[in-house]
Amino acid sequence: EVQLVESGGGLVKPGGSLRLSCAASGFTFSNAWMSWVRQAPGKGLEWVGRIKSKTDGGTTDYAAPVKGRFTISRDDSKNTLYLQMNSLKTEDTAVYYCTTGSPSYIAVAGNAFDIWGQGTMVTVSS
Amino acid sequence: QAVVTQEPSLTVSPGGTVTLTCGSSTGAVTSGHYPYWFQQKPGQAPRTLIYDTSNKHSWTPARFSGSLLGGKAALTLSGAQPEDEAEYYCLLSYSGAHVVFGGGTKLTVL
């Protein structure tokens, strides 16, 4: 069964840091392009960023609100995706989801969002 | 950054048909935007219904279909069920990593 499980959320003060993890199973993680999407309380979905597979360069892209503060990385030996969040702001409060899709579809479309984790809540508050 | 627009809310009667749309501030939505549609119920993660304009996953109920309609992406629900009451989001891709979600449509089945 294809599965994504996020962890690492919690309460952090403004200016603080937090690292989220996303454990993948049921598919070849090393071939997958992985994305993070967040959802503030009562609001819509917002793309945070993505990381390509190492085969495709392993490069990262970020949404403007988080660029320079958030870093996405991966450990293919552990089938795990990470989101390092620094200089956190109150507006970063959200549920954070990891998501991915078929590599063959990504090769055509550039992105895929077919499998989602259950999310982990991050609250930035003093 | 492009803005993706959806109807804030729609209501459909049980057994009825409703079409949700997804527009782009940059112009007509095309297959090149690789439209996605997601369903999200309260307290749950999004679930992907449609990808690449009109393709369904194995878990997508047959009553949902995707298309391009009048310069927008469209999600049509034919034969609405009470369990279809949810928030629906579309997503459009713009040149590689640049993807934008719509603001969501709250669908009420009443």
Image: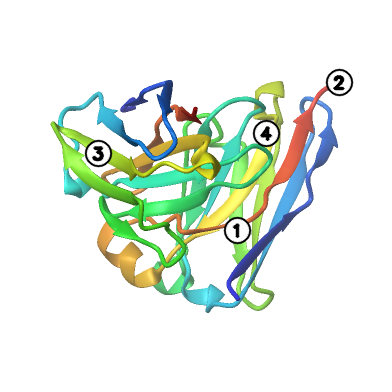
Are dots 1 and 2 on a single chain?
A: yes
Secondary structure found at label 4:
strand
Q: Are marks 4 and 1 in contact (CB under 8 Å)?
A: no
Secondary structure found at label 3:
strand
Q: Residues within 10 Å of mark 4 (few under 14, many from 20)?
A: many
Secondary structure found at label 1:
strand
Instruction: State the image coordinates of residue A112 (x, y, percent, origin top left).
Output: 40, 57
Instruction: Give the label, 3 or 1, closer to the camera.
Output: 3
Q: Three-letter amino acid code at disc 4?
A: Ala
In the figure, B44 relative to B6: above or below?
below
Q: Quadrant of residue A14?
A: top right
Q: Which residue is mark 1?
A: A73
Are dots 4 and 3 on a single chain?
A: no
Q: Which residue is mark 2?
A: A126
Q: Three-letter amino acid code at disc 1?
A: Ser
Secondary structure found at label 2:
loop
Instruction: State the image coordinates of residue B51 (x, y, percent, origin top left).
Output: 34, 54
Q: Residues within 10 Å of mark 1 (few under 14, many from 20)?
A: some
| Mark drawn on residue A94 | 4
Q: Residue at x 36, y 58 (%)?
A: B62
